[in-house]
Image (tube, grey):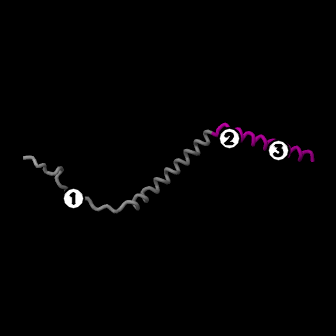
Amino acid sequence: MQKIINTIALLSGLTSLCVIGGGAYLYINKDAIAEKAIAQVGAAATQAIQEALPGLLSSAMPKQPELPKTTGGVLPPIGIK
């Protein structure tokens, strides 16, 4: 019976140490973790916008007529005598 109680006490102590160690790790690295998360969200948003943008532009723009094959003069004639 004493061995079971000692095992439970040992496991409880190890669990407490793991929780404290994990909390300390997160506290020390919280800035790096936050910056990494912000960068990932920004990259995902940029990719989603880039994928959606061609479809949005093509549906919003009216169909353009063909460009003319020939053009007129550069400037209208000036009435100099």
Of the numbered discs 2 and 1, the one sitting upstream in the chain is 2
Q: Which mark is residue 15?
A: none
* Above or below 80: residue 57: below
Image quadrant assignment for residue 68: bottom left
Q: Residue at x 71, y 41 (%)?
A: 23
Residue where numbered disc 1 is placed: 69
Residue where numbered disc 3 is placed: 12
Q: Residue at x 75, y 43 (%)?
A: 19
* Mark 2 residue element: helix
Of the numbered discs 3 and 2, the one sitting upstream in the chain is 3
Question: Magenta includes 16?
Answer: yes
* Above or below 76: residue 62: below
Task: Tell me whether the residue at label 2 lies in contact with that at label 1, contact meaning CB atoms closer than 8 angstroms.
Answer: no
Q: Position of residue 6 (x, y in %)?
A: 88, 43
Give the magenta-colored segment's residue range.
Answer: 1-30
Three-letter amino acid code at the position of disc 3: Ser
Q: Position of residue 35 (x, y in %)?
A: 58, 41
Of the pair 74 and 69, the residue shown nearer to us:
74
* Mark 1 residue element: loop
Work out how far the residue at label 3 is from the one at label 2, CA to CA, in angstroms.
21 Å
Q: Residue at x 17, y 55 (%)?
A: 72
Lateral position of residue 16 relative to residue 62, left or right: right
Three-letter amino acid code at the position of disc 1: Lys
- What secondary structure predominates along the stretch shown in magenta? helix
Residue where numbered disc 2 is placed: 26
